[in-house]
Image (cartoon, helix red, strand yellow):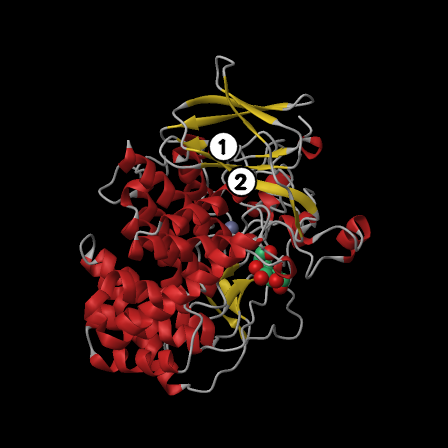
Amino acid sequence: METQSSCFRLNQVGYAAGLPVHVAILTEAPVRLLDASGTILGTIRADLTFDEASGDRVALMELGILPEGTYRLETDEESRSFTVKDHPWREVTNALIKGLYFQRCGCALYKEHAGPYVHAACHTADSADWENPSVRRSVTGGWHDAGDYGKYVAPGAVTVTHLIYTWKLFPDGCSDELNIPESGNSLPDILNEARYELEWLLKVQREDGAFHHKLTKAHFAGFIMPEEDREQEYLMPVSHCATGSACACLALASRVWKAYDPAFASLMLEASQKAWVWMQGNPDFVPFKNPEGVRTGQYGDRTDRDERFWAACELYAATGEPRYRETAEALFAEGLNLTAFGWADVAGLGALCCLFDLKEQAGEILFTKLKEGFLRRTEFALALSRQSGYGTALRPEWYGWGSILPIMSGAMAMILNALLTGREDMRDAALNQLHYALGLNALGTCFVTGFGEKSVMHPHHRPSGADGIDAPVPGLISGGPNKVFPYPATREKLGSDTPPAKYYLDETPSADTNEIAIYWNSPAIFVAACFNAMTLHQN
Ligand code: 9MR
Ligand code: ZN
């Protein structure tokens, strides 16, 4: 079906029986809502308003809570169906987690787990030190970052952290049946998947405690399968942000694995503490810049104060030593963005630790005061979603590279508010961000591969482009519209009049609008698992 000519935008994966159903309507004509038997349940007259991000005249309508079934929205010109189920988001949540399995590097993917998306073991050769190339060592494993085959420390640490907090907060929301190689062991599969990256993180630490910023070639590979990418990979120079993020993530993981594998937990805590010592000895922030001749992802950052804050929170939680709490308190006093959960701004991950793990133990400043500040900031996400015709928590001018990240981060913030306060307005606005990812957006596109009637088909993802299979690797989320920083080729096609929320090309070369990335999957996992768990508890 040609969704662009449709006057409905829906969650194409489906809605939950116990939660309010939202749809976007782009017509002022009367819209009938019918059930499966054709009975008209009501007639809607949408009061359209102009939505700046999309340029559409649109109304986000709440249809209330509907029992399980198939429904139809109908005008005289068009009829569009949607489903309401008891557990509509189980498969998509699992697929998003399994999407990370498909990113595994250093091992073969076998038919048994990967279906048709198999490949031989990739990137198994020893890596060279960029600054001293005669020094070589084995640094295999981890996840390919995105559509490219690089492995980057801070993005990896943030992704693992999203997985761990998903498991901590919504254990029922992620199934233990992902069909990955470790399935069936005593550990939940979401933690099994996280461990694959943690083992790699431990290999990227330098003797003195610092972490290399990344492990990549000097430039991106062509659109070839990973096992065909055989040029030399390098451990690039160390960085403050990589070291701070790895420090925090490993401290967190050490707390989790204490119960499952104490030896692994101790290794991680030692590595984390070593990283902290390096951070203390290197107080002056140096932003990472690609060395001359290196063209892979830079992942630059403006400050490491948020990484230091996050690491201090997690090390306090892991050890109980007051010096970590004092450092976190001092950094908190300087002001931090407490609802930032992405690879660059990580203070929100420290807030997660304080508010949901340490709780009162964090003390007056890091619990009571931080909670006030946190809740205040979450209002911002709610306000943005209210201002948007589609309910999307993003300003028109912020549709940049990977716009899915701030949208999913807004959802995370509102979910956490709802957990702390029980507010349903926050919960419902957060749910609209999941709807955005699954098709309730200006493009009418489901951004998760393998799902929805109009889904991403040509993500900028090397295996999807090179494997000879029409359908892309499933369970990967596209970065989505980007008008802030588009490629010249994209600008040529879309011009300057295309509105930000439609600045998107479902075309393989468009890394600027259609790449996938592990740290876009992971906040979507958090959000999807939250609502998946909610449906399990309601029914
Ligand atoms: O996610 C990154 C985005 O915020 C930046 O604007 C963009 C351009 O620098 O890079 C993105 O990260 C890419 C990384 O540099 C290399 N691997 C693929 C990442 C996703 O596009
Ligand atoms: Zn690989």
Real-space Cα separation, disc 1 to disc 2, in angstroms: 10 Å
Question: For the residue with label 1, is its CB less than 8 Å from the closest atom of ligand 1?
Answer: no
Q: Secondary structure at mark 2?
A: loop
- Front residue of this view, candidates 389 and 501: 389
Residue farthest along the top direction in this orientation:
37
Q: Nearer the viewer, residue 28 or 191?
A: 28
Tag 1 near tag 2, CB within 8 Å: yes
Which numbered disc flags the more N-terminal residue, 1 or 2?
1
Asked whether, in this view, residue 175 is left or right of residue 297, the answer is: left
Along the horizontal axis of the image, is 513 left or right of 488? Answer: left
* Crowd tier of the residue under label 1, counting other residues whose Cα lies within 10 Å: few below 14, some 14–19, many 20 or above: many
Mark 2 sits on what residue?
Answer: 448
| 26 up-or-down from 427: above or below | above
In the rendered structure, which amino acid carries the disc numbered 2? Val
- At 50% from the left edge and 58% from the top edge, which residue is drawn? 383
**Would you place residue 104 above or below residue 376 in this image?**
above
Q: Position of residue 391 (x, y in %)?
A: 54, 48
Rendered-image quarter of ligand 1: bottom right
Respond yes or no on whether mark 2 lies under 8 Å from ligand 1. no
Secondary structure under badge 1?
loop
From the image, state whether disc 1 or disc 2 is nearer to you. 1
Locate residue 41, reporting x and y percent.
Answer: 48, 22
Left or right? Give the position of 32 relative to 262: right
Residue shown at 67%/21% (left/top)? 76
- The answer to whether residue 523 of the structure is visible from this angle is yes
Residue 119: mark? none
Please state which amino acid type lies under the numbered disc 1: Val
Residue 189: give x, y in percent of width and height.
32, 43
**Mark 1 highlights which residue?**
13
Q: Is residue 205 visible?
A: no
Location of residue 116 in the rendering, given as x and y in whole percent from the top left corner = 52, 30
